[in-house]
Amino acid sequence: MRLRTWRAGRSDWRVQALSIFSLSVAFVCLASALLVVTNLAAVRDRWSRAGRATVYLRDSASETEVADLQRALEATPGVTRARHVSAAEARREVVSEGADSMLAALPPNAFPASIEVSFENDLSDDDLASMAVKLRVLPAVESVETYARWTERLSALLGGGVTASTCLALIVLCAVVSVIGSTMRLLLHRRKIEVEVLKLVGATDGFVRRPFVLEGATQGAAGAGGALLVLGVLFLMVRGRFDQELVSLLGVAPSFLPVPVALGMVALGGALGAITALLTLRRMAAV
Amino acid sequence: MSSSPPQGTFRPALRPGHRYDASAARRPILVFEGVYKSYRADQPVLRGLELTIERGEFVFITGPSGSGKSTLLRLVHRTEQVDEGRILFLGRDIARLSVPSVPALRRNIGFVFQDFKLVPSWTVFDNVAIALEVLGLPSRVVRTRVGESLERVGLAGRGGDRARVLSGGEQQRVAIARAIVGDPALILADEPTGNLDPQLAIDLLGLFEDIHEMGTTVLFATHDRTLLDVRARRVVVLDDGKATDVPQGLGALQELFEGESGGEGADVQGEGADEYVADSGVRGPAARQVVG
């Protein structure tokens, strides 16, 4: 069958190449969306396990209150470290890191003193939330930042990404079905004599259909594979330029699609191609 | 029938699960029983056709255009379905075969067409090998048998050529090689010489006769009288939906009419021979001679 498929496919290689190109374009959209979702998920996971909180202190808080609070935090189970950052130190860190003249021009009281708290990795979100509630009622505490809001926003963004990816997957599915269906109809038309000859010498419907189904599967898989290749090259080019910036901004390095996802996409392309080819041929009265 | 039918060792290719019926070898290879076929209700092509073809026969099917020669062959090949009646191939009613059984029937029948029905982009080898590939034979066996078939039709060493570069005669030889490569019990030839010049047509007929000598039954549809006169063989004349069997060939029939009329061939034309020859639409020198 492979020989027959190769024999038939060789003579129609232009049609096959055009089909694979069209499928690649469709799959690039899906793969891009999956790439964004994958990296968003990584950022969300990174920030949901940030393991730290910032306790902003009131300007009126005395040194004794701050020291007591620091000691109390250090003694709290789940807390690994509590570091006091004065307003001056906060200003120094921000101005030196950002090197922004506008930030440097801000008055010293624009940078509140705080206690940076580090937690053990296994501290649950509920424990962190209840600790934040208790800290907020203390007279020396202005506010508590647990970075949960960032995680929530990222989760919301991720949800949007997943929805967009699902929509894209459906569009890609329609595109794949349309492209492979049209290609099969065209190939069947071009190989009308071949099909006729096969039927005349006693080929079963399955025997006639098999090369077409294999070609459909190959086109689908090759389209998905081609899309991954193109996206991979683009990803490497972009990552080389922005890797460091993204790491410092988000705390995680951008990553390409995991191997199971990439393989799954190729398998999806192959399966879609095979099923579409089979359905198209079934609908054609000749085969 | 001009020669005694050799006893071949043909065993039909059967669908899985079906047993070989040895008694089938003793039956006529083809029996038409009251076969009706029409494409338009008011113009039946075949009207109650009765015909029996024994194993190992070489039978010409002739008649004017539209008399049903091709239809008859297509009915045997199950490319067309009978409207009424039965066609028994080795004892089995072709008309009642289920759709999945049709490929198995066709694997036991070689078909040669006027327009060759080759895939132009394939090589000669591929065009012949496909008849064995559908049987699922190993590639080694396929190579050997395709080589033998090409040798039989005089195309040894041409397996690598594309079908499209061959001449008409060569293409028809490839089609014949494809028809015989599966060692079928029956070969149907539908005007196989229609696109060839007279000399090539006679050469090709010789090839069919060689195949017949090996024990294969041949049904050769033609309206070329020249071919019918090459050798005395059984001729079935189709006209007006009926078959007229001429066991010793049209030449013998003509002699018979000439003999009955005391050698005054011109007087016989309108009364007897022309019913079989002139009105049957067969072309060629002999037909012209009888018609006058």
Image: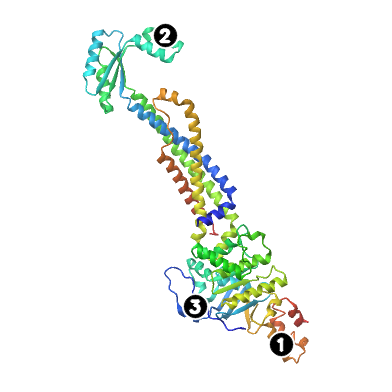
Circles 2 and 3: CB atoms closer than 8 Å:
no
Chain bearing mark 1:
B
Mark-to-mark CA distance, 2 and 3: 105 Å
Image quadrant assignment for residue A107: top left
For image coordinates 49% across by 82% down, the residue present is: B26
Q: Are marks 3 and 1 on the same chain?
A: yes
Q: How crowded is the residue under tag 2: few (<14 C-alpha within 10 Å), some, or many (20+)?
A: few
Asked whether residue B42 appears in the rendered view, the answer is: no
Circles 3 and 1: CB atoms closer than 8 Å:
no
Chain bearing mark 3:
B
Kind of residue sitting beneath label 3? Gly
Q: Is residue B218 above or below residue A128?
A: below
Which residue position holds label 3? B91
Image coords of residue A79 (percent x, y)? 25, 22
Q: Is residue B236 above or below residue A50?
A: below
Mark-to-mark CA distance, 2 and 1: 127 Å
Chain bearing mark 2:
A
Q: Is residue A20 above or below residue B292?
A: above
Q: Is residue A190 above or below residue A234?
A: below
Which residue position holds label 1? B255
Kind of residue sitting beneath label 2? Leu
Q: Secondary structure at mark 2?
A: loop
Picture disc at residue B123: none
Kind of residue sitting beneath label 1? Glu
Image coords of residue A43 (percent x, y)? 39, 28
Mark earlier in primary sequence (3, 1): 3
Please, which residue is most extreme toward the front here?
B157
Picture disc at residue A106: 2
Would residue A156 be found to the left or right of residue A168 on screen? left
Asked whether residue A104 appears in the rendered view, the answer is: yes
